[in-house]
Amino acid sequence: MLFVKKDEQVKSLNRWTWCKCTCLHLTIFFISGGPVELLIKNKLNEALHPSHMEIVNESFMHNVPPGSETHFKILVVSEAFDGLPLIKRHRLVNTTLDEELKTGVHALSIVAKTPAQWSENPQQIESSPACRGGFGK
């Protein structure tokens, strides 16, 4: 799901099926995932059995061809994270997605919470800042 400020332009969404629902301050696009996003979802489901998970393909925000699957933001809530420090949670997600990170996924932002942390402070994935174009720009 992609949240965009009302009346804000969205870059090309070709190759995606989407529907648009306009509410007071946001336009919400429900976007079906591409093959890499679905693979990420399946691998994380199998490895972590999450109670809650959100995966956002942020590739459209970067200087990549339309329809790319190179930049992702993931929110995952799992009992597998109980007792693990944040760095080990991230390593667990990165290890699970090792093949994808070696073969095309360029950037992965991870929010990894235990069910107890999630129940204390549930949140949506925050918007990422706009891409600055890379190459030190």
Image (tube, helix red, strand yellow):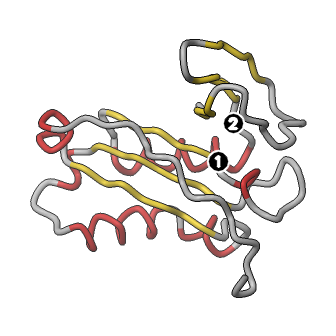
Going by the image, does 97 lie left or right of 137?
Answer: left
Residue 70, quarter of the rendered image: bottom right
Q: Where is residue 85 drawn, in percent x and y?
A: 17, 69
Q: Where is residue 44 drawn, in percent x and y?
A: 45, 48
Going by the image, does 91 lie left or right of 34?
Answer: left
Circle 2 or circle 1, nearest the eye: 1
Q: Amino acid at mark 2?
A: Gly
Helix, strand or loop at label 1? It is strand
Q: Amino acid at mark 1?
A: Asn
Q: Where is residue 14 drawn, in percent x and y?
A: 89, 36
Asked if residue 103 is positioned above or below residue 113 in the image, the reply reads below
Q: Where is residue 49 drawn, in percent x and y?
A: 33, 40
Question: Residue at position x 78%, y 36% from top?
Answer: 9
Helix, strand or loop at label 2? It is loop
Quarter of the image that includes the N terminus: top right
Task: Indicate which disc, 2 or 1, sits on the residue closer to the N terminus.
Answer: 2
Q: Which mark is residue 33?
A: 2
Asked if residue 7 is positioned above or below residue 45 in the image, the reply reads above
Residue 87 or residue 99, whichever sits in front? 87
Residue 79, quarter of the rendered image: top left
Mark pair 2, 1: CA separation: 8 Å
Residue underneath mark 1: 57
Question: Residue at position x 72%, y 54% from top?
Answer: 61
Give the residue furthest to the bottom: 136
Going by the image, does 25 lie left or right of 71?
Answer: left
Q: Mark 1 packing: few (<14 Cα in 10 Å), some, or many (20+)? A: many
Quarter of the image that includes the C terminus: bottom right
Circles 2, 1 touching at the beta carbon (< 8 Å): yes
